[in-house]
Amino acid sequence: MKKISNEIGKGGESVWPNASAFQDRLREQVAQKAYELYEKRGGLHGHDIEDWLEAERLIQAATKVKADAKAKVETKAKVDAKAPVRQKVMAAKSGSALDTR
């Protein structure tokens, strides 16, 4: 898992103002998933690192799927918002727009 640094900008403010909260939430999600994997294995000790790495992989994959879905919805919304303008432009180009002279 990549660590998000809390870099400081020119004005002294954090470039990532919510980085700490994000890291805490992500760490909690990974810990919970790792514990679920531990329990699924029947509580067998000695696989904590494997469980943690697998949990990180699963959380990152789920986060990517959510981000991809969100980007797709946002892109569709932008395209849909431009549709009326595009229709007017296409109508004007094709000469099918009403002549209001």
Image (cartoon, rainbow, N blue to C red):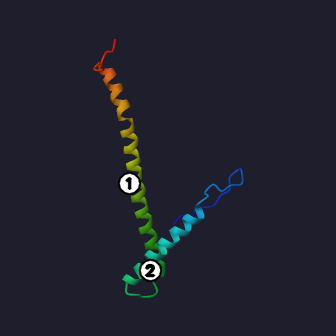
Q: Is residue 41 above or below residue 99?
A: below
Residue in the image at 41% along x and 68% along y? 58
- The dot on residue 35 is 2
What is the residue that sits farthest to the front in this orientation?
100
Left or right side of 59 for 92 = left
Binning the other alpha carbons within 10 Å of mark 2 as few (below 14), some (14 to 19) or many (20 upward) gives: some
Q: Quadrant of residue 55?
A: bottom left
Give the percent coordinates (x, y) of residue 11: 71, 51
Q: Is residue 35 above or below residue 83?
A: below
The residue shown at (33%, 29%) is 87
Which residue is the extreme one toward the left? 96
Left/right placement of residue 24 relative to residue 39 reads right
**Earlier sequence position, callout 2 versus callout 1:** 2
Residue 57 at x, y = what percent?
43, 68
**Mark 1: secondary structure:** helix
Disc 2 residue type (three-letter): Tyr
Label 1: which residue? 69
Residue at the farthest top position: 101
Image spot of residue 10 (x, y percent): 71, 50
Residue that appears at 72% across and 54% down: 12
- Judge left or right: residue 100 versus residue 32: left
Quarter placement of the C terminus: top left
Q: Nearer the viewer, residue 97 or 34?
A: 97
- In percent of the image, x 37 and y 84: which residue is there? 41
